Image (cartoon, grey):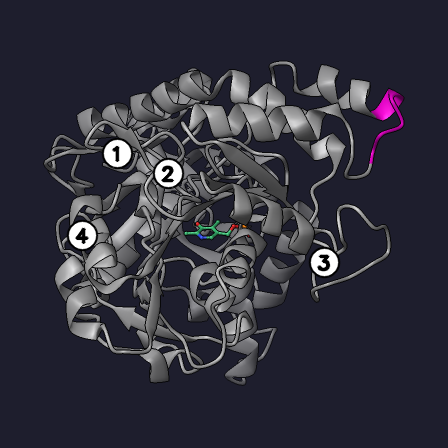
């Protein structure tokens, strides 16, 4: 293989091109008569040369450049791994005389996505059971079981399964009669589903800033943004961190506002010992593939109010009367979840506490690896707040540093995500912005690291990180 990677310094550009064509590696090492390395030509170099008008029969030496990557034969695996990435994948190895004696190829098949669902419990068993039962639509025992068990897990009376977390928010707004002319206060830093639900309900979102320490909606900003039209607040327990629920509930009482908790990223987190999702009039959960527990797609609304529970069931099912079939009193939706999805959800719920502790394990692991040097980790010592780890969330020093890490990690096979953009900077949401000072900064500095409910991947991730830091 090595000879297919080497071209003579006296050969033409065309010869190098042929070599690259034959070795299918995208590069060729250029050597002199004594096999000494003179440089490296990539298919990109040749393409650029052609575009610059260079003739293909010119000597390859005319397009050689000084910047190329190589390694000495006595370098360790770790040292060599530091030199390669998804872009620079094949490098020559030389001896002391600078003669090419070998090459190193970076395997790009190592890839750790930000999230992998953990489906190794009873998921498949219950899934098959629901399938065999033929109850594959939105009735069946798993729907009832999942609603009851998840509500119980969150210390709530009623659970209503829905197709996803986004429609859970929309359903909650609908049954609280929030619509045209009403204002709903939401945080600037959140996934867009939060604001979209408000807009789909024909209400007006009011985007307010977050606290710099918790990254969650700032109660002081909520107070400033309240008008006679304000009807509700949607606190989002962002990246597993609970909002300041004491203050938010106080404001709700004072101004007679509804609270819809967006718990899509915080199953199992607590504020003052109480689970998130047990504070508001209605709380909304997501069971998307990367959330704490998953049903593939799916969501749930929880409430302690029997009238709201009843109303949500009616709206979820086309607004159809529960006593008179095909009789519709309200214009509803089809927001139902299938029994198949609920079957997966029931199996996931059996292991939710293990998932949460394994995710926390990842966070502690990253803290040890990075040793306070590279990132500021999400706070886990704020008064009354017991966060959970959704995706490990950290802040880099500034935006450039953050973007550098995103790029480096991806090149080495670790998928990472930037934080959500500030809603207020996007054209479609701009006009709803009230304040976003902290959010702007946090959004630019934040990134999420791969975080799984299964700790088997830690050793491999550690190996990769050692080549980066
Ligand atoms: C994931 C998410 C949602 C939406 O949930 P889907 O099930 O994907 O529709 C809503 N809000 C927040 C904060 C989320 O992270």
- Considering the numbered disc 2 on the image, is that residue within a helix, a strand or a loop? loop
Identified at 16% across, 67% down, the residue is: 223
Per the model, the C-alpha gap separating discs 4 and 1 is 21 Å
Which is closer to the viewer, label 4 or label 2?
A: 4
Residue 89 in the image: state x and y as whole percent.
47, 44
**How far apart, in angstroms, are the residues tagged by discs 4 and 2?**
22 Å
Identify the mark nearer the N-term, 4 or 2.
4
156 falls in the magenta region: no
Instruction: Residue at 53% x, 49% y: name it.
Output: 308
Label 3 to label 2, Cα distance in Å?
Answer: 30 Å
Mark 1 or 3, nearer chain start: 3
| Label 2, label 1: how far apart the Cα atoms are | 8 Å
Identify which residue, 200 or 394, lies in the foreground: 200
Q: Position of residue 396 (x, y in %)?
A: 19, 51
Residue picked out by circle 3: 319
Quadrant of the image for the C terminus? top left
Q: Which dot marks residue 250?
A: 4
Where disc 3 sits, the SS reads: loop
Tell me where the magenta segment starts and ends, as one range: 131-136
Which one is earlier in the sequence, the residue at label 2 or at label 1? 2
Q: In the rendered view, tell whether residue 42 sits above or below residue 22.
A: below
> Which residue bears the numbered disc 1?
387
Q: Give the residue pinned by disc 2.
A: 266
Specify whether residue 133 is painted magenta. yes
Q: Check the image and report above or below for 386 versus 438.
A: above
Secondary structure under the numbered disc 4 in the rendered image: helix
């Amino acid at each position: 293989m090595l000879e297919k990677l080497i071209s003579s310094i006296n050969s033409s550009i065309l010869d190098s091109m042929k070599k690259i064509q034959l070795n299918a590696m995208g590069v060729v090492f250029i050597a002199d008569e004594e096999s000494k390395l003179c440089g490296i030509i990539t298919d990109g170099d040749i393409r650029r040369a052609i575009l610059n008008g260079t003739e293909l029969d010119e000597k390859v030496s005319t397009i050689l450049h000084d910047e190329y990557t190589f390694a000495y034969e006595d370098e360790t695996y770790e040292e060599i791994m530091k030199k390669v990435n998804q872009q620079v994948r094949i490098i020559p190895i030389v001896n002391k005389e600078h003669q090419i004696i070998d090459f190193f190829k970076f395997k790009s098949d190592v890839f750790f996505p930000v999230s992998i669902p953990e489906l190794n419990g009873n998921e498949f068993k219950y899934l098959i059971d629901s399938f065999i039962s033929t109850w594959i639509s939105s009735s069946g025992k798993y729907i009832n079981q999942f609603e009851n068990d998840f509500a119980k897990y969150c210390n709530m009376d009623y659970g209503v399964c829905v197709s996803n977390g986004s429609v859970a928010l929309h359903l909650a707004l609908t049954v609280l009669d929030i619509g045209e002319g009403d204002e709903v206060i939401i945080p600037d830093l959140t996934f867009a589903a939060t604001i979209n639900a408000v807009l789909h309900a024909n209400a007006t979102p009011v985007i307010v800033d977050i606290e710099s320490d918790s990254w969650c909606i700032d109660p002081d900003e909520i107070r400033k943004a309240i008008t006679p039209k304000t009807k509700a607040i949607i606190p989002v327990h962002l990246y597993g961190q609970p909002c300041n629920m004491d203050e938010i509930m106080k404001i709700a009482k004072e101004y007679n506002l509804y609270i819809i908790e967006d718990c899509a990223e915080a199953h199992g987190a607590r504020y003052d010992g109480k689970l998130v999702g047990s504070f508001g009039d209605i709380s909304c959960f997501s069971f998307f593939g990367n959330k704490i527990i998953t049903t593939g797609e799916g969501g749930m609304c929880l409430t302690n109010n029997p009238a709201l529970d009843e109303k949500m069931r009616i709206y979820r099912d086309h607004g159809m009367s529960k006593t008179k079939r095909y009789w519709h009193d309200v214009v509803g939706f089809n927001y139902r979840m299938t029994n198949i999805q609920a079957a997966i959800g029931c199996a996931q719920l059996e292991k939710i506490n293990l998932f949460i502790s394994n995710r926390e394990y990842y966070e502690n692991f990253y803290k040890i690896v990075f040793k306070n040097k590279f990132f500021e980790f999400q706070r886990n010592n704020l008064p009354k707040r017991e966060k959970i780890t959704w995706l490990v969330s950290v802040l880099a020093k500034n935006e450039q540093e953050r973007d550098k890490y995103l790029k480096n990690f991806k090149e080495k096979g670790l998928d990472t995500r930037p934080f959500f953009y500030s809603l207020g900077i996007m054209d479609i949401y701009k006009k709803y912005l009230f304040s976003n000072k902290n959010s702007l900064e946090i959004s630019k500095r934040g990134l999420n690291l791969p975080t799984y409910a299964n700790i088997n991947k830690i050793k491999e991730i550690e190996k990769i990180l050692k080549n980066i830091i």
